[in-house]
Amino acid sequence: MTDFRVGFGYDSHRFAPDRPLVIGGVVIPYELGLAAHSDGDVLLHAVCDALLGAAGLKDIGTYFPDTDSAWKNADSTMLLTKVVDLISDKGWKVNNLDCTLVLEKPKMKPHVDSIIGRLSELLRTEPDRVAVKAKTNEKMGFTGAGEGIAAVAAVSLIK
Ligand code: MG
């Protein structure tokens, strides 16, 4: 190991009707989706920012501005793939990812393993290097009121 970095990312999106709920690249059956210029994948956006931050790059909005129609309703797995390409070009490889979703509903437990599988593919690493947790906010704040979902992600990179 010649070099090691840590990155941190945060994102949140408001619930909205008539949209699919996509979290970690997995479609979750629920009556609401997340409002966003892209598909609103709050977890992948937090992961993108963690990766970019660890590599000393700018934030996700710099590379995928919400004023650019190219990213309208964009599949966020495409965004993450581009971010992984960016960090790979700089010689970085994902060592591990740890992330937490904060939401009251829907229950994420049945979907966590699918999300870990998808994330490990997208990050070109093994599933045991990826951890995904979900917790409620004890009914406090916007996540607690069920207005939206927040996600935080910490990543380490090695070169
Ligand atoms: Mg976002």
Image (tube, grey):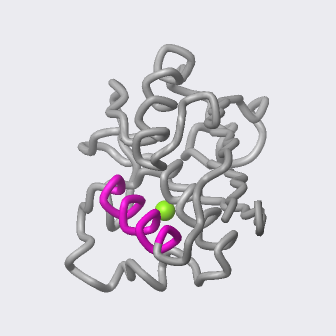
Residue 100 is drawn in which quadrant? top right
Left or right placement of residue 21 versus residue 7 in this view: left
Of 1 and 102, which appears nearest the observer? 1
Q: Position of residue 92 (x, y in %)?
A: 59, 66
Q: Position of residue 32 (x, y in %)?
A: 36, 37
Residue 12 in sight in this render = yes
Instruction: State the residue at coordinates (48%, 39%).
Output: 120
Residue at image location 78% in from the left, 29% down from the top: 138
Quadrant of image for the N terminus: bottom right
Q: Which is nearer the eye, 1 or 149?
A: 1
Q: Nearer the viewer, residue 102 or 158?
A: 158
Q: In the image, 38: left or right of 147? A: left
Asked whether residue 9 is drawn in magenta, I would say: no
Image position, residue 62 (x, y; %): 48, 85
As for residue 84 lying within the magenta part, the answer is: yes
Q: Quadrant of residue 134?
A: top right
Query: 85 above or below 118?
Result: below
Q: Give left or right: position of 120 versus 76.
A: right
User: What is the chief secondary structure element of the magenta stretch?
Assistant: helix
Q: Residue at x 56, y 17 (%)?
A: 109
User: Is residue 23 visible to us here?
Assistant: no
x, y percent for residue 111: 47, 21
Residue at image position (58%, 58%) is: 93
Range shown magenta = 76-88
Look at the image and tell me in which quarter the C terminus lies.
bottom right
